Amino acid sequence: MELEQLQKTAAEVADREDVKYVIGWKKGSYGYRVAPGFIEDAAGAAELIFSPLCTANLATYLTLVEKLPVPRGQEADDRKVAVMVKGCDSRAVAQLLVEKGIGREEVVVIGCPCPGVVDPELLAEKYPETEETVEIKWTEDGFLLVRGEEEIEISRDELLAEKCRLCRYPNPVISDVMLGEPVETRELVEDEGVAEIENRDVDERAAYWEEQFAKCVRCYSCRNVCPLCYCQDCILDRLNPTWVNRAVNFSENTAFNIARAFHLAGRCIECGECERVCPANIPLGRLNRKLAREVRDKYGFEPGVDPEAEPFQASFKPDDPEDFIL
Amino acid sequence: MSAMLLKKEKWPEFVEKLAGKKLWAPGADGDAMRFAPVTEGETPALDFNNTRVPPKEALFPQTETMYRFQLGAEEMEEPQLEDETVLLGVRPCDARAMTIVEKLFRWDIDDPYYVKRRELVTVVGLACSDPGLNCFCTSVGGGPASTEGLDLLMVDLGDNYLLEALTEKGETLLESAGDLLEKADSDAVKEKEKLVLEAEKKIKREVKTEGVPEGLPGLWEDPLWQNVSASCLGCGTCTYLCPTCHCFDIQDETEGFESRRCRMWDSCMFGEYTLHTSGHNPRPTRRERTRNRISHKYSYYVDKFDVIACVGCGRCINLCPVNIDIVEILKKVEEAL
Amino acid sequence: MSATFEPNIVAFLCNWCSYAGADLAGTSRERYPANLQIIRVMCSGRVNPLYVMNALQQGADGVLVSGCHPGDCHYMEGNYYARRRLGMLKDLMEFIGVDPRRFHMSWVSASEGHKWKEVVEKTVEDAREAGPFEGFRRRQIDW
C-alpha cells in the first residue's frame, strides 16, 4: 500500500463533517516506537504511517474513550470515529458489533491489508534500538530496515510476530474504505506455543504457569489494551463482592489471569496486544489462543468474523459437546 | 571515605561474607526483571542494564501486611521487621528515588513500615557505565554515579570493582569483607572519574526543568493534556514501574477467621483511584490522570519537598505500551509555558 | 495419596433437578460420601465460572456442578449455557495445570437419586486420587 494513498484517504475522512477524528499510527518519539495518532483534520494526516511496526490494535480506543455526561444545554458530540485497522484489528471491530459494544453507525473503518507485523522485542534484541527513529518496510518476502544510510534485509521468519505467523485474516473482514490490494491469506498452521504446553503433564503445566503468574505486577495493561475488555464496571475492580483480592501474590494473580482469559473465551480475536504490552512478559497469548482453539475446534465458532453472529458465551447449540459431563 | 578494590573473581566470596543478612539482587533468572531475595549459595550477576521493576519493592512491597488478626480475638499481630537486608546492584537513580520517597514517608508522622525497612537496609549501588536509551538522570539532579541514597558505590573498572563506602553502614560492609579488598590507588579513582564522564556523555535524552514546577499549575486547562493522554490506555505500567511512585491503597482481606489488613500499590492512572463513594470522580478521564501524574512529579512534590519526584530512569518510556514519553510531554510543557 | 485424605468438594446444584435428586437420594436412604458442601443455585446456568475458581482458591479440593438434563431446564435453556461455559472453563483449568479430576459437571434429574450417589462417589474418588489441592489456593502469606 502506498503511503500517499493512506494519508490522502485519512485526510479525506478526517475532513468529513460527520467524523470526529481518525485514529491511525504515527511515528513514535524515538527508535522503533510507533504511537497511536488522533487526526482531527486533513493537515494532521501527513503524520500517519503504516509499517511492520504498527502492532497496536487501535480498535481499543473505540470503547476506551470516556463518555462524560453532557452538560445541560449542550449537545452530545455523536460524530463518528474513524479507525485504521489491520486484519486482526478489524475482527475486534466486528466482535464489538456482535456484542453491541459499538454501533455500526458510530465508526468508519479504514481497512489496511497487512502482510504481518514484526515482534518489537525480538527486533530490538537483534537490531538494538537507537535514539533516532528508523523505518521498516515490507518487501516481497520479508522486511527492510532503514537506519540512516544503512539498509538491512531481514527475512520474514526472523522477525514476524507470533500472532502473525498464526494469522488467517490478514485482510480486514469489515471496512468502509479499503486501502491497497488484499494480501495473500495463509493456511492454518499449528500453534507451537500452545502445543508445547499441552504436551507437558499437568504438574509441569502448573509449575510453568506458577512461574509466569508470579511475575504479574497487576498493572492491568493486558486488560486495558484489549479491545474486547471494555466493561465499565470490571469484576477485577469490584470490591463488593471481591472476586479477586487486591493483594499481589501467586494465588490472586492466577485468579486474575483465569478471569481475564476466561472472559475472552470465544471473544478473543488474537491480536496479541495483551502479550505485547505485558511488562512482565507473561505469555498471555497462549492462554487466549488455547481457548480460541477450543472454541474453534469443539464448537465451530470463530469470533470477530461475522458481525451478525451471536456472541459465543451468550448462545448455545443443543448439540454442543458434552463428553466431559458425568 | 575509603575507596577499595575488589577483584571481579572475588565477587562470589564477597557475597558469601554477607551471609546472615538478607540479600536482594536483580532477578537471577537471566531476565533481570526485578529485585528478588538471593537464595543461599547463589551469586548475583551484575551484568544487567536495569531491572524492569525498581528495587523500591524491597522497602515498599507491592503488598504489605500491616497487621493480622483473628475474627473474634482481641489481639492483633504486627509484622516483625528485623532482618538486616543488603540490596546489591542498585542503580544510582533507584537509590536516589529512595531518598525522595523517604521524604514523604518521614513527613508529618513517620511511616513505621517504610522507615523501619529503610533503617535495616544497606544499599550497595552499581554505577552505570552504559546508560540506557531513555535515561535522563542528569537532567533531574542525578547522574550515572550519583551517590545519594547509597551506602556503598561499586564501579565496574573492567577487572576490578571500585568500592567506595559512603556511610557508616557502607564502611561496616567493607570491613566485613576484610582481606578480599585492596586499597585503591589514585589511578583507579581517576579511571572511575573518566568512566563516569564517558557514561554521562552517553546520556542523550534530556528534559529542561527550569520554570516547570512553578509553571505547571498554570497549564491546568491547556490542550496539551488532551493531546498527550489521548492514546493512554489507563494501565498502571508507568506508575507501578516508577521508582518514585509511592501511592498505596489499604484493604482488609479475610479468609475464614483469619484476616489481615494490608496495603498495596495503587496507581493514579486507574479510574478507581479517585472515585468517590457517591460515584463522583474528580478525575473522570485519562486527561486529568495524566496531568496529575506529571504535575505530581514535577510540581506538587517540588512544592512540598523541594525535589523533583522523577529520577530519569526511563522505565515509563521504555515500557509504555503506547509510547507516551515523559520527555516529550515535558518538551510540550516547556513550549506551553 | 494416603487413604485417609478426605477431599473438600464444593457442589453447585440446580434447585429444580439436581438438588431434588440429592434430596431423593437422601429419602431413598442411598449412602454416599459426606465430603460435599452443597450450594443450591436456581439454575446451573447461574454458576459463574468464577465460582469454581473461587472455590478452589478458598480451599476446595474439587468442584461439582450439576443441573437438569439438556431439554429439561426449568428455565428452558440455562443448562445449555452452563455446558458451554463450564466446558470452556474445564479446558482452561486443565491448560493452566489444574488436575482435570478436580472439576466435574453432571446432569442429575429429580428422579435420579441413584445416579446422584454415583456422581458423588466418582467426584469424591477423583478428588481423593488427585490429592489436596495446593495449586493457586490462598496460602498463609509471609510478612
Image: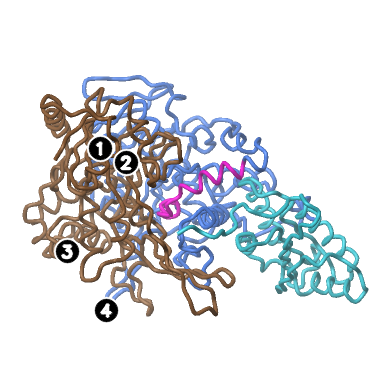
Chain colours: A blue, B brown, C cyan
Q: Is residue A25 visible?
A: no
Picture layout, residue A139 above or below residue A252: above
Q: What element carries label 1?
A: strand
Picture layout, residue B14 above or below residue A313: above
What chain letter is assigned to the residue under label 4?
A: A
Disc 1: which residue: B126
Cα distance between the residues tagged 4 and 3: 35 Å
Are discs 2 and 1 less than 8 Å apart at CB? yes
Q: Is residue B45 visible?
A: yes
Could you tell me residue A192's position as x and y percent?
58, 32
Q: What element carries label 4?
A: loop
Disc 2: which residue: B88
Tell me which segment is drawn in magenta: A205-226
Marks 3 and 1: which is nearer the front? 1
What's the residue type where badge 2 is placed?
Answer: Leu
Q: Which of marks 3 and 1 is nearer the N terminus?
A: 1
Quadrant for the N terminus of chain B, please: top left
Which residue is at a point 17% across and 28% down the rendered structure image?
A: B184
Task: Tell me the number on the disc at residue B300.
Answer: 3
Q: Quadrant of residue A180?
A: top left
What's the residue type where badge 4 is placed?
Answer: Gly
Disc 4: which residue: A73
Q: Quadrant of residue C25?
A: bottom right
Marks 1 and 4: which is nearer the front? 1
